[in-house]
Amino acid sequence: MISICNKSVLGTVSEKDIEALKPQALAAAQTLEKGDGAGNDFLGWLHLPSEITAAELDDINATARQLRQECDYVVVIGIGGSYLGAKAVIEALSDNFAAYKQNEGAKVVFAGNNIGEDYLYDLMRLLEGKRFGIVVISKSGTTTEPAIAFRLLKAMLEKQVGKAEASKLIVAITDAKRGALRSLATQEGYKTYVIADNVGGRFSVLTPVGLLPVAIAGFDINALVAGAVEMEKAPADMMVDYAATRNALYQAGKKVEILVNYNPNLHFLAEWWKQLYGESEGKDGKGIFPASVDFTTDLHSMGQWIQDGERTIFETVITVERQRNEVVIPTDNADLDGLNYIAGRRVDEVNKMAELGTRLAHVDGGVPCMLITLPALNEKYLGQLIYFFEKACGMSGYMLGVNPFNQPGVEAYKRNMFALLNKPGYEAQSAELAKRL
């Protein structure tokens, strides 16, 4: 089981400060379970792991096998929670150089998470003449970024293999009954999966939204879900510790939480975490700002600021006990680089000492630090970690006094963008912006 330690925050806040907030954290957990808090119509994720059936997992695995057999590439189209969770799990479990190797089965690539013209151009050139499939993820089918990517790639696929064959290579994950994508999927006969109305995007990684891309990439979604079930059924102590500690630090003036990893595979796990906490807590003029760094790399860029900058930050470090592989540093007779003192040691031992030394230095420099430990980086422990962060996020948001399950602020940029593009129905806003500009 993963574990958490908050001892290195003491000195900034006391055990008494943290203990004083634990009743609030427990009350927040009870509010989630009772379903009587703000945003309670978006609690479908809470018992999702234990409610997924073997038949549902078998169906997802069967679809994934078919796409892996028939495609060189599968493009997963989605933005925000419709792509970050899958990307996080796939990157965490993948060979770092898989993109450069001729592995069996389809390679998963992502689109619809930006409006980069060169990105889409390069992707389309990659797919020219290749066997590819599409997994398009959108409740509505009209979100701008994925809708543009899907329009382009659907037309390209249909041109390459014909409309009838293309319909067999497109999977839509969308609303059960309504929306443009649901209508198109019904019309064209696409294989479909449902995004439940009561599961928001940033909590959807353990639904087909995340599970299908992860399975296509060749990873064990049964073990991923099983890990999440273990955390769902475990006592809430770890979530209580995390939620209470981060809120105690916030009340003590620590306004920024930096998620730190010492494993390059965890970069996108931090990107997923940033959306989960940023979109859940950042509202009503409140919220801890979620940031992330990849150490030791970023110690050579952000290390100075973290060590000596404004003392408004705290760190949550994710450490992985056992690596998948072993590399030993060799002896060099000349020793011009001065590394013979660590010859014969594993690279991970050096990395662990860099981690420990950095945590000590940062705590000494006034940066409180929590530590989350994964026994290994595999599907089971990732499932535990994902559910841990999800439930702790709901608890922490309630402790903060916000609705953790809405995101009213994300619509502001969309209204301006639509007005600037003269979208029908936005004429008044277009005229208003034209005066401002």
Image (cartoon, rainbow, N blue to C red):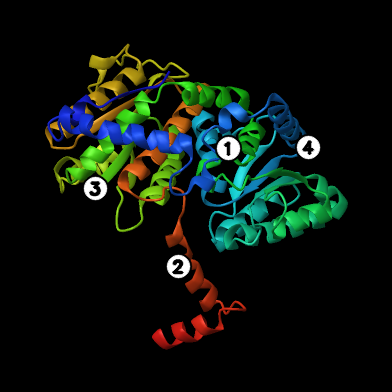
Query: Which residue is at a point 50% across and 32% down the rendered structure image?
Result: 96
Real-space Cα separation, disc 3 to disc 4, in angstroms: 49 Å
Query: Which residue is at a point 14% across and 43% down the rendered structure image?
Result: 308
Label 3 vs 1, first from the N-terminus? 1
Real-space Cα separation, disc 1 to disc 4, in angstroms: 18 Å
Of the residues tagged 1 and 4, which is closer to the observer? 4
Say which mark, if any, is on residue 412: 2
Say which mark, if any, is on residue 255: 3
Q: Which residue is mark 4?
A: 70
Quadrant containing the C terminus is bottom left
Q: Which residue is mark 1?
A: 99
Q: Are marks 2 and 3 in contact (CB under 8 Å)?
A: no
Quadrant containing the N terminus is top left
10 Å crowding of disc 4: few (<14), some (14-19), many (20+): some
Of the residues tagged 2 and 1, which is closer to the observer? 2
Q: Give the x, y percent position of residue 417.
A: 51, 72
- Would residue 272 appear left or right of 113 to someone viewing this image? left
Real-space Cα separation, disc 2 to disc 4, in angstroms: 41 Å
The residue closer to the viewer here, 186 or 382, is 186
Label 2 vs 1, first from the N-terminus? 1
Query: Which residue is at a point 60% across and 55% down the rendered structure image?
Result: 122
10 Å crowding of disc 2: few (<14), some (14-19), many (20+): few
